[in-house]
Image (spheres, rainbow, N blue to C red):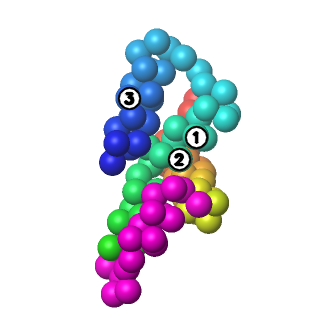
């Protein structure tokens, strides 16, 4: 949750200071601000055999969770751009 709020604050700073982030900055912050990483991690709470080790693994953002969040973020950006095209 803390990472999600920090990502939203970074986006607010970009907007306030009219900053155009690099692709690397954008992807890192938007991946987190989308909430997909938090959603995936909280889904583990519904598992019957949940252990502390699984939660530690998930909160350390393994590559599989990062990749999933990036795919969801890019998909969301593409769909959002199709719905609201820029002129």
Residue occupying image coordinates x 32% and y 73%: 45
Is residue 43 depicted above or below 82 in this figure? below
Q: Quadrant of the C terminus?
A: top right
Q: CA distance from mark 2 to mark 3?
A: 14 Å
SS category of the residue bearing label 1: helix
Return the residue at label 2.
31
Return the residue at label 1.
28
Q: CA distance from mark 2 to mark 1?
A: 5 Å
Is residue 76 depicted above or below 68 in this figure? above
Residue occupying image coordinates x 42% and y 67%: 55
Residues rendered magenta in the picture: 46-62
Q: Judge by depth and name the residue closer to the eye, 22 or 80.
A: 22
Q: CA distance from mark 1 to mark 3?
A: 13 Å
Return the residue at label 3.
9
The x and y percentages for residue 77 are: 55, 47
Q: Looking at this rendering, what residue extends furthest in the top direction?
A: 17
The x and y percentages for residue 32 are: 48, 46
Could one spot residue 77 in this view of the protein?
yes
Mark found first going from the N terminus, 1 or 3: 3
Quarter of the rendering containing residue 70: bottom right
SS category of the residue bearing label 3: helix
Could one spot residue 36 in this view of the protein?
no
Is residue 11 depicted above or below 71 in this figure? above
C-beta proximity under 8 Å, tags 2 and 1: yes
Residue 79 appears left or right of 6: right
Mark found first going from the N terminus, 2 or 3: 3
SS category of the residue bearing label 2: helix
C-beta proximity under 8 Å, tags 1 and 3: no
Q: Judge by depth and name the residue closer to the eye, 3 or 34.
A: 3
Instruction: Give the crowd class for mark 1: few <14, some 14-19, many >=20 residues within 10 Å.
Output: few
Instruction: Give the crowd class for mark 2: few <14, some 14-19, many >=20 residues within 10 Å.
Output: many
Q: Looking at this rendering, what residue extends furthest in the bottom direction?
A: 48
């Amino acid at each position: 949750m803390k990472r999600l709020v920090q990502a939203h604050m970074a986006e607010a700073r970009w907007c306030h200071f009219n900053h155009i982030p690099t692709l690397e900055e954008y992807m890192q912050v938007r991946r987190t601000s989308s909430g997909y990483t938090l959603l995936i991690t909280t889904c583990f709470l519904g598992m019957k055999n949940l252990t502390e080790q699984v939660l530690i693994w998930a909160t350390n953002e393994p590559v599989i969770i990062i990749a999933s969040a990036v795919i969801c973020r890019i998909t969301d950006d593409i769909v959002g751009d199709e719905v609201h095209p820029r002129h």
